[in-house]
Amino acid sequence: MPRVKRKKVEEIDFSSFDAIKLSIASPQDILKWSYGEVKKAETINYRTFKPERDGLFCEKIFGPTRDWTCSCGKYKYMKNKGTICDRCGVEVTEAKVRRVRMGHIELVVPVVHPWFFRKPPSRIAILLGLKITDLEKLIYYAGYVILDPKNTPLRKGQVVPVEEYYKFRERYGNRFVAGTGAEVIKKLLKEIDLDKKANELRKKLEDKNLPPQFVSRIVKHLEIVESFRHSGNRPEWMVLERIPVLPPDLRPLVPIEGGKFASSDLNDFYRRIINRNNRLKNLLSLRAPEVVINNEKRLLQEAVDGLIENGIRGKYFTGSGGRPLKSLSDSLKGKQGRFRQNLLGKRVDYSGRAVIVVGPHLKLDECGIPKDIALELFKPFILRELMKEEDIQTHQMARKEWMRATPRVYDILERLIKDHPVLLNRAPTLHRLSIQAFRPVLVEGKAIQIHPLVCPPFNADFDGDQMAVHLPLTPQARIEALILMLSSNNIFSPANGKPISMPSQDIIMGLAYLTKVKKGVKGEGRVFSSVKEVIYRYQIREIEIHAKIKVKGINSIKDENDWTTCGRVIFNEILPEEMRFWNKEVSKENLRGLIEEAYKKIGKARTVKLLDDIKELGFKYATISGLTINIDDMVIPERKFKLIEAAKNEVRKVEQQYKSGSITAVERYNKIIQIWQNVSEEVSEELFETLKKTEFVPYSFDKPRFNALFLMADSGARGSRIQVRQLAGMRGLMARPQKRLRGEMGEIVESPVISSFREGLTVLEYFISTHGGRKGLADTALKTADAGYLSRKLIDVSHNVVITSHDCGTENGIVATALKEGTNVIESLTERIFGRVALKNVTITNPETGEVEVIVKQGEIINYEQAKRIEEAGIESVPIRSVLTCQERYGVCAKCYGMDLATGKLAKIGLPVGIIAAQSIGEPGTQLTLRTFHVGGIAGTIEEVSEIKIDRDGKVSFEDLKYVVDRYKRNVVISRRSKVIFKPKDGPSEVFDLPYGAEIFITKPGEVKRGTLIARWDPRVFPLIAEEEGRIRWEDVV
């Protein structure tokens, strides 16, 4: 074998490169990479445990197994570096070269690379102009290709099966030339003149009469030819003459207990190839029959296919227990492959992991790091500082001091962490806010403490969740962490601009308790001269926090309806001056609005302080309240049983109608479902009214002030109306888990669960419930992967969309209108245009003076107040800049994108808006899947529009209205194109479709008042209405 000069891999500078180009390896390239030919299939000598010579782990080819030691032991030290042992031929060098040095296997016959033949479009088949099935016959020796027909009726390039080939041989003898296998394919590919082929294909494309399918075939062929021409690769390189052998340390063979070895699957593939290659060499030297040799060649081709991509032909090489072996392709692709597992997902130093617990006294930008983790994380920094001390001269002394964790070490650590933020990450990292920076605070114990308000962005809870902590090292990384990633700088969601670091659960419960009012408590009706006096009187226990009082300067003393409570005065004490006096009962929703208002009025820094103050106050009063749930809080509504009895009677009537044949099975099912859904809603309303009554009962020492269950659900602290309904009302209808269309018959179990958890379920009800419960658990396991895959695909298509300039200067845009479905407004005009840039001046005309006022100038961002004003002025559509019409060559411009919702300002250059958009869809998708099982299979009501009700004063008129009066004296619409046109006193007209069969209450045009019901219909019923009187006869009705 000729020795090829090469630059050793160890000497290449991997840091200096401009780009990475992937190309087909030529036989010469494979020889350049190789340090020797692997001739034997042996791996390790099972007596000496040393690699076999010329085998798959040969030290002569791949390098020594021990640093600076040759195989025979003649050379043992670093002083002999680079020496090649004259006895064993091993170069004296480091053992790590066994991770780099490659070998090769010289094949007796060429084999086709399966990627270029199998992966569509088949490059080899297109270049040779063959069908894939014919090419497969050639590669696996099941057919022959005619190379030269000479004077026979055969055609050049014709592929014939083996049986026919032998018949032709008998008939024509040696009067034609044919061949089979990869050798022939290599020969045919070598003969292709790429320049000539490209010109021929171009001439063919000039023919205007070519059918479209031929054009697409020629274009595909030309693309491949041009790719080969421009890349410098040769088509014949798609057929392999020699195979590179991976360095041995990348396919290890490890001895395990009992004298056995654990081996990489690649070793099995290489062993199979070498064995078959050597056997073929022997058969050729013995001049074995052609059938035997062809069979051995086919086996060699299959062995190489298995190495490159196992199972590419549908048949797998398997290991012990029938497990498919992992080929080179398998080790590259997928989540566990080389790229995603090792190159993109490296393990990092300076990191730790621990269970999280709540840190109720931390500030928003702080996290509690256990001292043990901090000592290990900051170890190099601590050692550096210790070396500066006079009494520590050596590194060993500093290390010993660090290991003893002396007070001096902790003093240094305290000093170091002051300006050194840490990053906290909670898996799964679904969006940007899953990794945030915090200022570390040293804490005792083994758990990381996190601020309760950062739980929503991390989607963390304290039931055993773990978080990873990372240390930014360089000054640039630390500055970036403090400016961009600090939790106090990320209180708004990049997805929707709403506050995401929001008080929740205990805090909301404490504040709701604090700001509630209770009749008959101590101090009720008193009037105070100032806020200070109120707090003083509360502290000396003259008044209680729920007492209805008046405070001079806050309340109008003479107005009976103007009052506050002691608790609300205390709550207002933490609010900034600009935002007082906030006289409401706190709930999650109105607190969200308060924080949004605070950000606009007082800025980010003071909003963060306000959030911390709200947290402290909420926790304090949640503790003082002593609220808990007991079984008496679950009050069963008195009317429940009457409602259920009435529903059962209605169901009996429906069943009777079905038995008499007056309604179909689908109508019967829909009606029963509707009856029970309505009853569930009525029971829910009745339950909440019952629970709420506790608040209006005068205070009594032996009874609770409030119903804790109602307080938690109503304030948004915990639970929902559906969950409370299940506890004390009725569980209602249950979903049947099956893959059906939404709203199809059979999706919901007809028999409702009438009992609540308070009463206890019957055996049948429990069994019906478990059906949906299992669905929830199964969905969580199965659909999370789908949601994660959606996120990956979204990132894949949008990751290159970045803000690349301030303004592209386009004059194009889109017209934004409110999104509606029937009469329901899905997304209002305010929401559609908020944060976007106006394409033209948005103006309104004063109806009295006729003056035109510009609300938003062209090129300005539309803020929330302006958007609200535009909608209230009755403007239906607004032209705005859009990324769809952006003329920026790469990415999009800031003006076409609009506001960065996380900051409330125009997007800055470099903002990765594509990633933000993908994460904004992917993160809620995954969270919804994970949250499925919490509901426990309750059937959700399908949102349906079933009436037209006017929401303001105005005039109504009709279009194409036809109706008849039925026997119940109802006006029933019989036109399929009827419309109601409503013109309000201010604002544009609205048009509503009137469905066929709807009952209409107003039939003449005229003035209508707000709340007037125009029409009503049942969305589940599709009636047939007779327009004239007479007899009906049904034919062929099943």
Image (tube, helix red, strand yellow):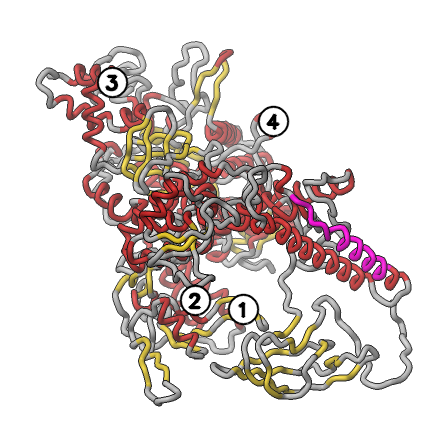
Q: Determine whether 967 is above or below 639 in the image.
A: below
Mark 1 vs mark 4, CA separation in Å: 47 Å
> Residue 642: within the magenta?
yes
| N-term mark: 4 or 2 | 4
Which sits in the foreground, 736 or 343?
736
Q: Which tag, 3 or 2, sits closer to the chain's start?
A: 3
Q: Which residue is mark 2?
A: 831
| Res 189 visible | no
Q: Which mark is residue 213?
A: 1
> How many residues crowd mark 2 within 10 Å: few (<14), some (14–19), many (20+)?
some
The mark closer to the camera, 1 or 4, is 4
Residue nearest the observer in this picture, 238 or 968: 968
Over which residues does the magenta segment extend? 635-655
Q: Which mark is residue 321?
A: 4
Name the N-terminal-most of marks 3 and 4: 4
Q: CA distance from mark 4 to mark 2?
A: 59 Å
Q: Are marks 3 and 4 in contact (CB under 8 Å)?
A: no
Farthest residue toward the left? 390
Q: Tag 3: Cα neighbours inside 10 Å, few (<14), some, or many (≥20)?
A: some
Amino acid type, mark 4 = Gly
Tally the numbered discs: 4
Name the quadrant of the N terminus.
top left
Q: Residue at x 31, y 47 (%)?
A: 532
- Specify whether residue 352 is painted magenta: no
Residue for point 73% across, 60% down: 674
Does dot 2 land on a helix, a strand or a loop? helix
